[in-house]
Image (cartoon, rainbow, N blue to C red):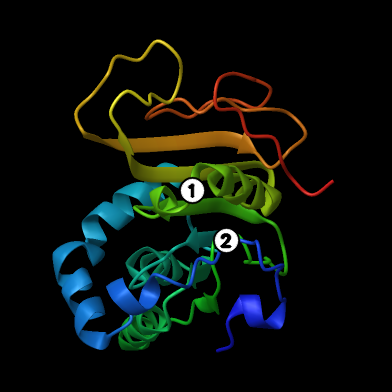
Amino acid sequence: MPRSDTAHPRPVWYFSEYAPVGIDLGSKAAVAAYDRNQGTDPQADDTLLDRLGVSDGTQLVDLACGTGSLAVQAARRGAVAHGVDVSEEMLAFAKARADRFGVAPQWHHAGFLDYTHQGPLADAVTTKSALHQLPDFWKQQALLNAAGMLRPGGSFYLWDVSPAGTGVSRGEPDRAATDDRDVVVGGCGCRHGVSLRRSSVSPAGDLGEGAVEGGRQ
């Protein structure tokens, strides 16, 4: 499948999400090792999908989907799942996994910044262990892009690591060198702001630290 940035060229100053792939995850061996180490946990996937209320007909977009475990598990429930990744090898692995289970999520060779969602707005957008790879300025753009593909009242799930002392909201104490972050934002994809509250679902209209505003205007 063609890269999204070649189908829709960007200015020369635009951050390229594809550059690191050849070093880290651009070979079959590297992708297989990734999947063995951290790419597959159906029980954890099901726990998250339950938490997000994913069921038959749910529209789900998994950004930086890796080897496709979550998207495949969602499709097995009858969800309309979209897996998005900058690595062709990751997507090939994900498609092979889907074929083994007899499901067909839609796979997209794209990144946080250049993925353009087609079709109905998503009920849920997820991303795990990837957003930290973007420079801070481009993280904001990635979050706005994610918000824009969510339906009003949809949920955005983020799991990532962050440097010490960079809490989700003001007043959080300094933590260790890296800190697992698990955030569900409810009510995203609308004209109201929603606060990023750690390990919680927050209602639309609660504008606070780390707020995201979005939805197609």
Identify which residue is drawn at 69% across, 22% down.
Answer: 205
Quarter of the image with the N terminus in it: bottom right
Estimate the x, y position of residue 144 in percent, counting from the top left: 65, 45
Q: Name the residue: 53% across, 46% down.
A: 139
Which residue lies at the image location 38% right of the left edge and 86% below the top edge?
92
Instruction: Give me the disc on residue 135.
Output: 1
Q: Residues within 10 Å of mark 1 (few under 14, many from 20)?
A: few
The amino acid pointed to by label 1 is Pro
Which amino acid, mark 2?
Phe
The vertical placement of 83 against 53, above or below, is below
Q: Nearer the viewer, residue 212 or 185?
A: 212
Q: Residue at x 48, y 29 (%)?
A: 201
Q: Residue 15 carries which label?
A: 2
Secondary structure beneath dot 1 equals loop
- Judged left or right of residue 208, residue 217 is right
Badge 2 marks a residue whose secondary structure is loop
Label pair 2/1, CB-CB below 8 angstroms: yes
> How far apart in space, not on screen, are marks 2 and 1 (Cα)?
9 Å
Q: Quadrant of residue 187?
A: top right
